[in-house]
């Protein structure tokens, strides 16, 4: 290439030294730029403020809606009771046991049925329609039946909790078993893998993300089942404490008990998230995992 | 149809004996009334590299599946080293368009997986030294304990080459192995593939969409024609070995590409 030729394509760049800097930044809206901690504190303060405001207007009776301060006082009171190991702790322990047993039972049944549905044609074609039919029923309506069959003890609550939590686990397991892609299945076929090997070494690990999604949905359902069982079937659990407090018009107590229950639910959810991060370490975390 | 690969070169005549023999292989999918393969005859010799090229739906994937023992033919015979192919076999190595490494296993665990599946975990662990040597062969030394999520596309395909080679297969069936990679990586990987095949005297059969890729790698290029799928021409590529990327611009190379493209273009008009 000759010297004269090089000038012609570069003709438009002769004033290159005078080119202005064109560095610019992309701007996000101010709302998205607020640090997370500050946004959350502001939201919480606004919620408490509106609550306090409503109570101070006197429109609502304090029996129906106690002030945030009263609820806070009762939260401390219940907390002290729990730490000192009084009947509150015993009640929380009973509910915790119901939740844990219910979850374990739901996992055993849900996982087995999920494998049956996800792995066999028989399960998918013959069993699944019945499961869908049962799933569409309002499951809480079965509570009186469980109480009639299993009595007023812990068993009927465990059964209801497990009954509600089983279906998301079935769906999560079955969907997960279908998630291994065509290429991976082909690979296992070329390696001469048996059906069992394909299930254990490919389909189950590949399906873990969906299984965990099912477990998280189930962890919410299992709490609802245990508390509903206690509302309707008595016993000595936390649900019974709530029912008694409500019947005595002790609304601050109802609020604080619900808060402690939500902590139990949160603990279970976080435990499952922790297991997921450990077992499904290769999966990129998403919003749903936080 | 004369098979160009059967022409014997003096000196290597002993090596050039057939390993894979397909005779009058026919495949019809009754449910869809598709005649996928029509009387395909094919012979692969030891140490040879063959490619099959054709438009989508010409039956080349079906052919590969039948050769791999993943699907039975409707009629005809498939023999590998004198034994009929009646299902997946350990002396057949396969490689796909995607590396399909399992993300929950490390690179080395992925590579010894074919051994683990067939012979159990203990046998797989015993093969880890071989796997390390293979990783060195493909230039992935030091990545033994890395999870596939951290490998680039090209590195993942190198690892899947190792997984294919760990069982020491007699033939390598390659289903568009590098078509998901970018052009530069792909050319480089093709040269690597040639080096690996010649260093192990491997018999390879490649399915591809790319005419230059088929020409640069192969001793014979089979041109397939669709509806029903059949081999219409076997083009012998008489370029010196080892092939280099510089050959891509030579007149002989261009002539081969032109010849095959002409053949494919005619089919496209039909």
Image: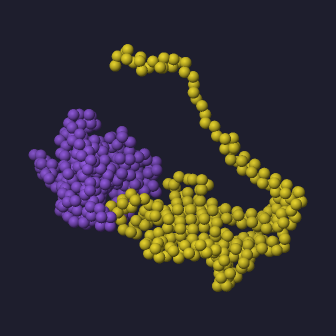
Chain colours: A yellow, B purple
Determine the residue positioned at 62% across, 66% down: A219
Q: Looking at the image, is A160 positioned above or below residue A273?
A: below
Instruction: Classify B33 as above or below B101.
Output: below
Task: Kindly identify the residue that appears in the image at 53 percent across and 52 percent down.
Answer: A284
Q: Residue furthest front?
A: B270
Task: Please tell me whether residue B71 is drawn above or below residue B163 in the rendered image.
Answer: below
Instruction: Please count the marks in the image.
Output: 0
Pick the front one: B94 or B123: B94
Q: Is residue B39 left or right of A70 when viewed as pictured?
A: left
Q: Is residue A172 visible?
A: yes
Q: Position of residue B196 (x, y in %)?
A: 28, 46
Quadrant in the rendering for residue A67: bottom right
Does B130 sit left or right of A53 as displayed? left
**Residue B28 horizontal/vertical position (percent):** 27, 64
* Closer-to-camera residue (B223/A139): B223
Q: Position of residue B250 (x, y in %)?
A: 23, 34
Residue B195 visible to the viewer: no
Work out which residue is located at the far left of the displayed protein and give it. Answer: B10
Nearer the observer, A267 or B208: B208
Q: Residue at x 48, y 17 (%)?
A: A14
Q: Residue at x 37, y 55 (%)?
A: B111
Question: Residue A249 placed where, x, y %?
Answer: 84, 71
């Amino acid at each position: 290439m000759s010297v004269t030729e090089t000038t012609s394509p570069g003709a438009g760049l002769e004033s290159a030294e005078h080119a202005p800097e064109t560095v610019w930044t992309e701007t996000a809206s101010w709302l998205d730029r607020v640090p997370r901690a500050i946004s959350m504190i502001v939201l919480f303060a606004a919620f408490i403020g509106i609550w306090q405001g409503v109570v101070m207007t006197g429109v609502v009776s304090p029996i129906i809606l106690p002030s945030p301060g009263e609820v806070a006082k009762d939260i401390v009171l219940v907390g002290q009771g729990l730490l000192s190991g009084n009947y509150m702790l015993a009640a929380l322990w009973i509910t915790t046991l119901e939740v844990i047993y219910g979850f374990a039972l739901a996992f055993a049944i849900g996982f087995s049925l999920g494998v049956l549905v996800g792995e066999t044609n028989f399960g998918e074609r013959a069993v699944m329609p019945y499961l869908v039919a049962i799933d569409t029923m309002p499951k809480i309506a079965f509570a009186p039946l469980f109480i009639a069959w299993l009595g007023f003890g812990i068993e009927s609550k465990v059964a209801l909790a497990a009954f509600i939590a089983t279906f998301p686990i079935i769906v999560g397991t079955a969907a997960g078993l279908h998630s291994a892609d065509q290429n991976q299945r082909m690979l296992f076929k070329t390696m001469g893998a048996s059906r069992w090997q394909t299930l254990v070494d490919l389909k189950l690990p590949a399906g873990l993300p969906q299984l965990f999604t099912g477990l998280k949905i189930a962890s919410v359902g299992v709490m609802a089942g245990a508390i509903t069982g206690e509302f309707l079937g008595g016993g000595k659990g936390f649900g019974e404490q709530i029912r008694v407090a409500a019947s005595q018009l002790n609304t601050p107590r109802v609020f604080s008990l619900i808060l402690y229950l939500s902590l139990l639910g949160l603990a279970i959810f976080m435990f499952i998230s922790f297991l997921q991060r450990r077992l499904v370490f290769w999966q990129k975390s998403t919003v749903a995992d936080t | 149809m004369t098979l160009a690969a059967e022409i014997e070169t003096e000196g290597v005549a002993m090596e050039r004996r057939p390993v894979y023999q397909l005779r009058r292989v026919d495949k019809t999918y009754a449910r869809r009334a598709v005649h996928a393969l029509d009387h395909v005859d094919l012979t692969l010799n030891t140490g040879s590299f063959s490619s099959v090229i054709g438009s989508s739906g010409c039956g080349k994937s079906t052919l590969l599946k039948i050769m791999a023992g993943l699907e039975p033919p409707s009629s005809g015979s498939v023999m590998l080293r004198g034994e009929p192919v009646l299902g997946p076999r350990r002396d057949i190595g396969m490689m796909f368009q995607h590396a399909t490494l399992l993300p929950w296993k490390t690179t080395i665990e992925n590579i010894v997986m074919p051994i683990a599946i067939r012979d159990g975990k203990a046998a797989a662990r015993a093969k880890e030294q071989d796997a390390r040597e293979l990783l060195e062969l493909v230039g992935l030394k030091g990545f033994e304990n890395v999870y596939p999520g951290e490998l680039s596309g090209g590195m993942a395909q190198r690892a899947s080459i190792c997984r294919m080679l760990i069982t020491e297969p007699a033939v390598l069936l390659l289903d568009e192995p590098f078509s998901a990679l970018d052009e530069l990586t792909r050319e480089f990987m093709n040269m690597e593939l040639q080096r690996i095949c010649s260093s192990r005297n491997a018999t390879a059969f490649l399915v591809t969409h790319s005419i230059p890729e088929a020409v640069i790698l192969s001793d014979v290029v089979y041109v397939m024609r669709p509806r029903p799928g059949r081999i219409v021409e076997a083009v012998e590529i008489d370029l010196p070995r080892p092939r280099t990327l510089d050959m891509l611009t030579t007149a002989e190379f261009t002539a081969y590409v032109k010849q095959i493209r002409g053949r494919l273009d005619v089919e496209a008009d039909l």
